[in-house]
Image (cartoon, helix red, strand yellow):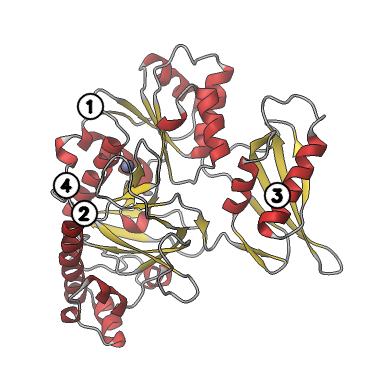
């Protein structure tokens, strides 16, 4: 592993000590630096001196996206504005954008974390890393770029879209690592296949950011692009928590190692806000340990995942969580059942003959009864509709068995559903 991403932490005990020190620092820093945090803590009757053990984190009040909106444009700011060297914003679909501030040290810490991601993905300084994610006020492009330069590989800041240029760079520059959303990865893999580029390019790794990739999608991307399945990596990331680069699944793909020397991760039941049992699915709640400008204390991310409790063969002391299994906001209620899109794509991943692309369409009929239609593509290798009936039945039965609801299924030709360069919309809820 590269020298600059090494952590002095070797054991779980050292990690806990480091976390406690970071937690104490963060709480005191926020209390003294931010009137907003101070008022929140005072209301909850908690003072920095009350934090003596890691369990004391549970005395602290939660922060949510509502707090970020209230503090717009510089929410949770805990340093003088003159110390802020940069802001980033989330794309924000509803209401005001979330804007987060960074000090020079925050930017430096982010670079270290992201450089560690490239190291865990097995990159070297020889790598040429094509960064096909959005540049601008959001965190993706800046984060991938910053980490790449800190790591010492060559960054090719190609940005999203522009498939012709992407393919040209892959061929002419002999790019070895491609960074993109999973949707863009599928689009690129289809182009590599269509243009017969597989033998002419040197691509050996793809790192997906900012969008969950299903197993079926990864398999398809691997087959079409020629990149080995175990060389596809996921980087989770939240603008609120620096941006992408706060963890990565190593080459063993047992889960996503997260950088627990930069933040504490709690997995809580989104309803009761109590910890779930180890290994159970819950909401990720994060507390930063070194963030200066906009520290997060028990920030409710709305992302759902679970802790992976088995150790990873790579021997890293960094704990693991599962892939992001969806957002508690993405959950839809259908006939009184809570359903996450990830439920559906896990089911489809195991249906023989089903492609990776699908849509979930929800309608309500005149009698007030709800209907769910799953539209999915046939696998690329099946050219006619002779298996459609069987695929339809398999999907219906699997959904019934695993989610306990009935659905209608429509099978479409491979390539019939829209592709996206950013994130693919899966759920279309037409009920009032
Ligand atoms: Zn590992």
Q: Position of residue 294 (x, y in %)?
A: 26, 63
Q: Nearer the viewer, mark 4 or mark 2?
A: 4
Q: How far apart are the alpha carbons under marks 4 and 1?
A: 19 Å
Q: Is mark 1 within 8 Å of ligand 1?
A: no
Q: Nearer the viewer, mark 2 or mark 1?
A: 1
The disc at residue 106 is: 2
The residue located at (83%, 63%) in the rendering is 365
Q: How far apart are the alpha carbons under marks 1 and 3?
A: 46 Å
The residue located at (43%, 67%) in the rendering is 277
Is 130 left or right of 166, judged from the image as shown?
A: left
Q: Nearer the viewer, mark 2 or mark 3?
A: 3
Q: Answer with mark 3 or mark 4, whichever residue precedes in sequence.
A: 4
- Residue that label 1 marks: 125
The residue located at (60%, 53%) in the rendering is 343
Based on the displayed image, in which of its 4 quarters is residue 179 positioned?
top left
Q: Answer with mark 2 or mark 3, whichever residue precedes in sequence.
A: 2
């Amino acid at each position: 592993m590269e020298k600059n991403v090494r952590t002095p932490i070797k054991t779980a005990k050292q990690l806990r000590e480091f976390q406690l020190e970071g937690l104490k620092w963060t709480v005191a820093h926020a209390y003294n630096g931010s009137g907003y945090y101070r008022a929140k803590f005072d209301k909850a009757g908690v003072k920095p001196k009350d934090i003596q053990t890691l369990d004391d984190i549970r005395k602290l009040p939660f922060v949510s996206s509502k707090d970020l909106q209230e503090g717009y444009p510089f929410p949770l700011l805990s340093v003088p504005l003159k110390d802020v060297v940069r802001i980033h914003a989330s794309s924000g679909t509803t209401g005001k954008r979330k804007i987060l501030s960074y000090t020079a040290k925050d930017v430096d810490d982010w670079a270290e974390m992201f450089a560690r991601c490239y190291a865990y993905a097995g990159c070297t300084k020889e790598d040429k890393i094509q960064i096909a994610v959005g540049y601008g006020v959001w965190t993706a492009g800046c984060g991938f770029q910053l980490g790449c330069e800190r790591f010492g590989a060559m960054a090719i800041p190609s940005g999203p879209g522009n498939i012709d240029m992407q393919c040209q760079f892959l061929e002419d520059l002999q790019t070895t690592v491609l960074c993109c959303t999973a949707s863009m990865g599928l689009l690129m893999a289809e182009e590599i296949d269509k243009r017969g580029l597989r033998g002419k390019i040197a691509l050996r790794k793809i790192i997906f950011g900012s969008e969950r990739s299903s197993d079926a999608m990864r398999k398809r991307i691997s087959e079409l692009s020629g990149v080995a399945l175990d060389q596809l990596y996921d980087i989770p990331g939240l603008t609120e928590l620096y941006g992408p680069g706060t963890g990565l699944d190593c080459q063993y793909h047992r889960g996503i190692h997260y950088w627990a020397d930069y933040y504490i991760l709690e997995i809580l039941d989104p309803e009761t806000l109590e910890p779930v049992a180890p290994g159970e699915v819950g909401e990720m709640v994060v507390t930063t340990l070194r963030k200066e400008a906009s520290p997060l204390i028990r920030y409710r991310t709305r992302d759902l995942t679970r802790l992976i409790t088995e150790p990873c063969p790579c021997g890293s002391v960094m704990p693991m969580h599962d892939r992001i299994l969806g957002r508690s906001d993405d959950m839809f209620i259908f006939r009184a059942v809570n359903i996450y899109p990830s439920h559906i794509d896990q089911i489809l991943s195991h249906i023989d003959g089903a492609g990776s692309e699908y849509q979930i369409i929800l309608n309500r009929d005149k009698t007030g009864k709800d209907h769910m239609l799953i539209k999915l593509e046939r696998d690329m290798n099946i050219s006619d509709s002779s298996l459609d009936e069987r695929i339809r039945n398999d999907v219906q039965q699997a959904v019934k068995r695993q989610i306990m609801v009935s659905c209608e299924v429509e099978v479409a030709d491979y390539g019939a559903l829209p592709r996206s360069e950013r994130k693919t919309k899966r759920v279309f809820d037409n009920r009032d």
